[in-house]
Image (spheres, helix red, strand yellow):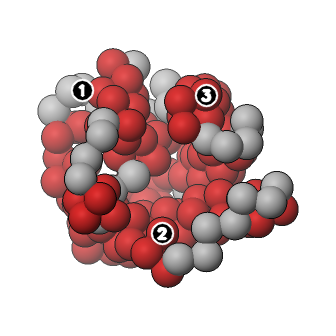
């Protein structure tokens, strides 16, 4: 999916420090969208592959983003019909929870591997991701996402 490649590019694009702190997790949002909109096209395989690509590009531990994205995409696929039926505000709350699970998994693996980042600023991505979810879902739906 080209949208996942574009989201990976937005995720690794160098930004000033102040803007990098509030950057949403574009790749995670994209994987969540495809796992909800078209579970057969998205899903755990897409989550694992995108996470592995992110690990190769920026992860200190190979497999941490792959594991976290696989878990989040599994949960999204499992509950995709319930999530899809919710209004945008409620979907944003669900996405906030999914992003929090993703960030906690990455945080835990960082701690276990000896690369702890304990700054509370690492959790801002969950808030900004939930805030941009309605816009991100609208943009991704224009690429042909509601085919299930």
Given residues 18 and 79, the one toward you in this image is: 18
- Gap between marks 1 and 2, in whole Å? 32 Å
Q: Picture coordinates of residue 134 (x, y %)?
A: 21, 59
Residue in view at x 72 percent, y 59 percent: 115
Q: Picture coordinates of residue 55 (x, y %)?
A: 61, 35
Residue in view at x 49 percent, y 80 percent: 120
Quadrant for the N terminus in the image: top left
Q: Callout 3 environment at 10 Å: few (<14), some (14 to 19), or many (20+)?
A: some
* Mark sitting on residue 122: 2
Given residues 103 and 57, the one toward you in this image is: 57
Q: Give the label, 3 or 1, closer to the camera.
A: 3
Q: Give the label, 1 or 2, closer to the camera.
A: 2
Q: Are marks 1 and 2 in contact (CB under 8 Å)?
A: no
Q: Callout 1 environment at 10 Å: few (<14), some (14 to 19), or many (20+)?
A: few
Q: Callout 2 environment at 10 Å: few (<14), some (14 to 19), or many (20+)?
A: some
Judge left or right: residue 112 versus residue 132.
right
Q: Are marks 2 and 3 in contact (CB under 8 Å)?
A: no
**Res 99 seen here:** yes
Q: Picture coordinates of residue 119 (x, y %)?
A: 53, 77
Give the mark, 2 or 3, whose residue is nearer the N terminus. Answer: 3
- State the SS at label 2: helix
Give the mark, 3 or 1, whose residue is nearer the N terminus. Answer: 3
Residue in view at x 17 percent, y 40 percent: 139
- State the SS at label 1: loop
- Gap between marks 2 and 3, in whole Å? 20 Å
Quarter of the image holding residue 4? top left
Residue in view at x 33 percent, y 19 percent: 2
* Mark sitting on residue 56: 3
Judge left or right: residue 1 versus residue 6.
right
* Mark sitting on residue 1: none
Residue to which mark 1 is pinned: 144
């Amino acid at each position: 999916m080209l949208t996942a490649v574009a989201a990976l590019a937005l995720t690794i694009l160098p930004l000033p420090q102040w803007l990098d702190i509030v950057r949403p997790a574009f790749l995670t949002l994209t994987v969540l969208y495809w796992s909800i909109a078209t579970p057969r096209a998205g899903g755990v395989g897409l989550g694992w592959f995108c996470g592995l690509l992110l690990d190769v590009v920026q992860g200190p531990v190979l497999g941490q983003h792959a594991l976290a994205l696989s878990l989040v995409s599994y949960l999204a696929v499992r509950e995709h019909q319930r999530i899809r039926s919710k209004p945008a505000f409620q979907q944003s709350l669900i996405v906030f929870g999914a992003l929090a699970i993703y960030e906690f998994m990455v945080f835990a693996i960082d701690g276990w591997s000896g690369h702890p980042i304990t700054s509370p600023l690492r959790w801002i991505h969950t808030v900004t991701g939930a805030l941009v979810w309605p816009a991100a879902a609208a943009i991704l739906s224009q690429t042909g996402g509601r085919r299930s």
